[in-house]
Image (tube, rainbow, N blue to C red):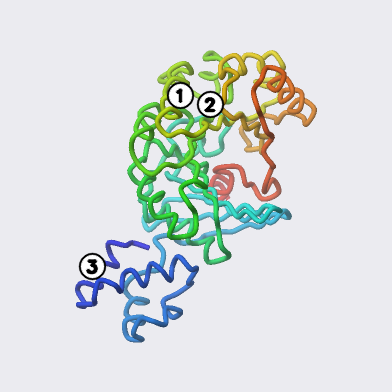
Amino acid sequence: MDYEALRAFLEERGEPPFREEQVREWLARGATGYGEMTNLPAGLREDLEREVPISTLTVTRTATSSDGTVKALFETADRRPLEAVLMRYRDGRRSVCLSSQSGCPLTCTFCATGTMQFGRNLTGDEIIDQALHFRRIEPIDHAVFMGMGEPMMNLDAVFDACERLPEVGIANSKTTVSTVGWLPGIERMATEGPTVRLALSLHAPEDALRSEIMPVNDRYPIAELIEACLEWRTKRKRKVFVEYLMLEGVNDSPDQARQLAALLGTGHDFKVNLIPFNPSGTGYVGSSREAIEAFRQALGRAGVHATVRLTRGRDIDAACGQLAVRESVA
């Protein structure tokens, strides 16, 4: 919802300030329309329905996986595409993967979003509306900024959204902001905004390879990123999650695991999350289960704790950007 438009409309009507809070509470409960907001006068509900859309986004397509994952393709008011995903887990967790930009300017070579034309930063309202879309389906309790875009390049809006996610049922301790290594954003997050989790999408243990697959590394090399993450760890008192996408024949050898372990050290500052590659149409092939397990074991022998992420939504183009790219060429 465009909360500025809501506020202006209510003020113009001379409504008391608590009306805005009532609307926000209903949205956070999963209300699908103003008609459900029974503690608002009927006339006000009718006028709101006509004048203030309940979402800043329009759903243009949805897909549901056999594992329960739901992916939605949205369009903003100015026709910019973006995606978000609801991931359901057997332990009861309901996590939403949120986009912070329409497209992404950083062109990581393995990412379908990187093949799109960059649109613009999303507003805090547009980010929250992704979460609210899925809240209208069922309660949600985790959020990850791992959708389209680089969150650290739109940090004011991301901070705004993080401050409001608890209203929807997602605590800051259950919110993760992931970055491909936008150094100024990591530095800001150490002292500004809510205390959320930090994840660094590293994907390579040394600069030459990382620059090849992630051009942002030419600007902010690995050593600078690790230093900034350790500073964040010192200030925020939380581990840094290291995301590592497993690409066959690119970054998945035991030697590279040992390089990664040497880079991160054997303390308790980092936790590695190995990610099976969700095919994205970019020419890469995912590592085999055996290669991923060998990599994980090599890290463990070097004293680095690593887990393997559960793959979700593989049958519905759930990798970041896939649905939007397919729609654009259909």
| Residue labelled with disc 3 | 8
Q: Which residue in the rendered view is the most extreme toward the right?
A: 290
Q: Amino acid at mark 2?
A: Asp
Q: Amino acid at mark 3?
A: Ala
Horizontal and vertical percent position of residue 78: 36, 55
Alpha carbon of mark 2 to alpha carbon of mark 1: how far? 7 Å
Q: On residue 269, which mark appears?
A: 2
Horizontal and vertical percent position of residue 269: 53, 26
| Residue labelled with disc 1 | 230
Q: State if disc 1 and disc 2 touch (CB < 8 Å).
A: yes
Name which of mark 3 and mark 1 comes first in the sequence. Answer: 3
Query: In the depicted view, which residue is nearer to us: 96 or 105?
Result: 96
Alpha carbon of mark 3 to alpha carbon of mark 1: how far? 43 Å
Q: Residue 304 is drawn in which quadrant?
A: top right
Q: Amino acid at mark 1?
A: Leu
Q: Residue 272 is drawn in which quadrant?
A: top right
Q: Is residue 74 left or right of residue 44?
A: right
Secondary structure category for the residue under label 1: helix
Q: State if disc 3 and disc 2 touch (CB < 8 Å).
A: no
Alpha carbon of mark 2 to alpha carbon of mark 3: how far? 46 Å
What residue appears at the point 52 percent right and 63 percent down from the top-left corner? Answer: 135
Q: Is residue 269 left or right of residue 191?
A: right
Give the label, 2 or 3, closer to the camera. 2
